[in-house]
């Protein structure tokens, strides 16, 4: 698999390059110590030399009134001394500046290398986690499957919806909505289609609206980003609407921090009641975070209709977006 090849390449990179990188950083630290020492020496020697010249000038001011010849000679000597000091200091100052510039460039390159390495590690981690959870499935006995086989329970309602407005209420649970085809992986009262939300018995581009309430948090972020949001977008007609209500993590954290929200309620909303297999939460959202996910999936006209809205134990927000076609 490509992901494991990337991991092997990354491991070779770490084994071959990191020791050299650490050695370079150690050398830079040593060079910085030398430069700092030289700067310190200059900082000490320059004021000493200038104070000596100031004493000479003060002396000249005292004798100038009665001995012009001596004053002129001393001024010439001081000027020559200044030129000599300047000539002596200039090369070293230039060398120090060059060393500092070189260190800055080396540090920048080191930082870029470290940033690249960290980025590659994170990329491989995400690829492996996604592949382990959603990649090729392991062999299983016949008839043993984790996914529900799609089944249309109310065929007449689906036929009528296709002739008018085909609107889906995904993950409806025990709360079916009027005017929607209600979808759940459990065959509950009011459910019109028993199916996984990732494998609906519908054609691409035939759905007018997809709505879900407190469903998105049941899926890991990478599955939403790579699989579910692109899939739902493909089901929508051009201009079709995706709308969702999800727990508002931003509001819950704010209210808990202010002492206005019970910890047990917040924990249950964030992680799910965990009463059955599908009642675990894998994600949390803020309006801006979910908006970015929708934008990445190609949705437009993203709008937050409500935020921080209290609903029983939960604070929630409502968001919508459209398939541009």
Image: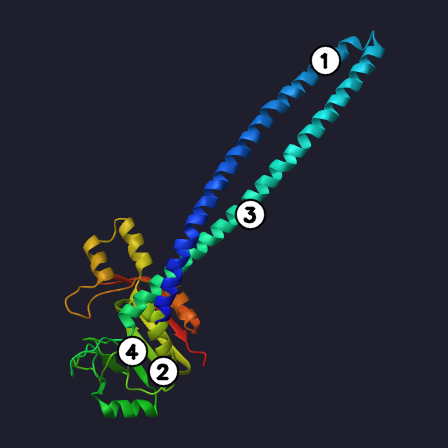
Q: CA distance from mark 2 to mark 4?
A: 11 Å
Residue on which disc 1 sits = 58
Q: Residues within 10 Å of mark 1 (few under 14, many from 20)?
A: few
Mark earlier in primary sequence (3, 4): 3
Mark earlier in primary sequence (1, 4): 1
Q: Nearer the viewer, residue 80 or 260?
A: 80
**Residue lying at 39% horizontally and 67% vertically, measured from the top left:** 293
Mark earlier in primary sequence (1, 3): 1
Q: CA distance from mark 1 to mark 4?
A: 90 Å
Q: Position of residue 306 (x, y in %)?
A: 35, 65
Quadrant of the image occupied by residue 48: top right
Q: Taking 325 as reference, is 258 left or right?
A: left
**Residue lying at 64% horizontally and 33% vertically, measured from the top left:** 92
Instruction: Give the secondary structure at mark 1.
Output: helix
Q: Quadrant of the N terminus?
A: bottom left
Q: Taking 215 as reference, is 3 left or right?
A: right
Closer to us: mark 3 or mark 4? 3
Closer to us: mark 2 or mark 4? 4
- Residue 134 visible? The answer is yes
Q: Residues within 10 Å of mark 4 (few under 14, many from 20)?
A: some
Residue on which disc 3 sits = 105
Residue on which disc 4 sits = 198
> Pointers 1 and 4 in contact (CB under 8 A)?
no
Q: Is residue 201 above or below residue 56?
A: below
> Pointers 3 and 2 in contact (CB under 8 A)?
no
Instruction: Give the secondary structure at mark 4.
Output: loop
Mark earlier in primary sequence (3, 2): 3
Mark earlier in primary sequence (2, 4): 4
On residue 235, the disc is: 2
Q: Position of residue 151 (x, y in %)?
A: 22, 86
């Amino acid at each position: 698999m490509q992901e494991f090849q990337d991991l092997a390449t990354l491991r070779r990179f770490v084994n071959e390059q990191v020791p050299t990188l650490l050695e370079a950083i150690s050398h830079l630290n040593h060079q910085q110590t030398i430069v700092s020492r030289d700067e310190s020496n200059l900082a000490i020697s320059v004021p000493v030399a200038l104070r000596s010249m100031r004493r000479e000038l003060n002396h000249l001011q005292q004798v100038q009134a009665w001995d012009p010849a001596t004053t002129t000679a001393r001024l010439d000597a001081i000027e020559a001394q200044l030129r000599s000091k300047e000539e002596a200091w200039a090369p070293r100052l230039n060398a120090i500046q060059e060393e500092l510039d070189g260190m800055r460039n080396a540090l920048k390159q080191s930082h870029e290398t470290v940033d690249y390495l960290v980025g590659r590690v994170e990329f491989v981690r995400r690829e492996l986690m996604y592949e382990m959870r959603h990649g090729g499935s392991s062999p299983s006995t016949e008839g043993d499957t984790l996914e529900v086989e799609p089944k249309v329970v109310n065929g007449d309602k689906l036929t009528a919806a296709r002739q008018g407005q085909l609107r889906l209420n995904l993950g409806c649970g025990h709360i079916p909505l009027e005017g929607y085809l209600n979808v759940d992986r459990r065959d509950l009262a009011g459910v019109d289609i028993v199916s996984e939300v990732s494998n609906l018995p519908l054609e691409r581009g035939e759905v007018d609206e997809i709505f879900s309430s407190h469903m998105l948090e049941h899926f890991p972020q990478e599955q939403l980003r790579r699989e579910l949001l692109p899939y739902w977008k493909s089901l929508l007609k051009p201009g079709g609407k995706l709308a969702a209500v999800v727990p508002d993590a931003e509001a819950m954290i704010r209210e808990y921090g202010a002492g206005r929200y019970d910890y047990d309620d917040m924990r249950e909303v964030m992680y799910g009641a965990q009463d059955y297999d599908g009642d675990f939460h894998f994600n949390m959202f803020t309006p801006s975070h979910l908006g970015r996910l929708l934008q990445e999936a190609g949705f437009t006209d993203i709008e937050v209709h409500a935020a921080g809205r209290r609903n029983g134990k939960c604070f929630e927000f409502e968001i919508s977006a459209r398939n541009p076609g």
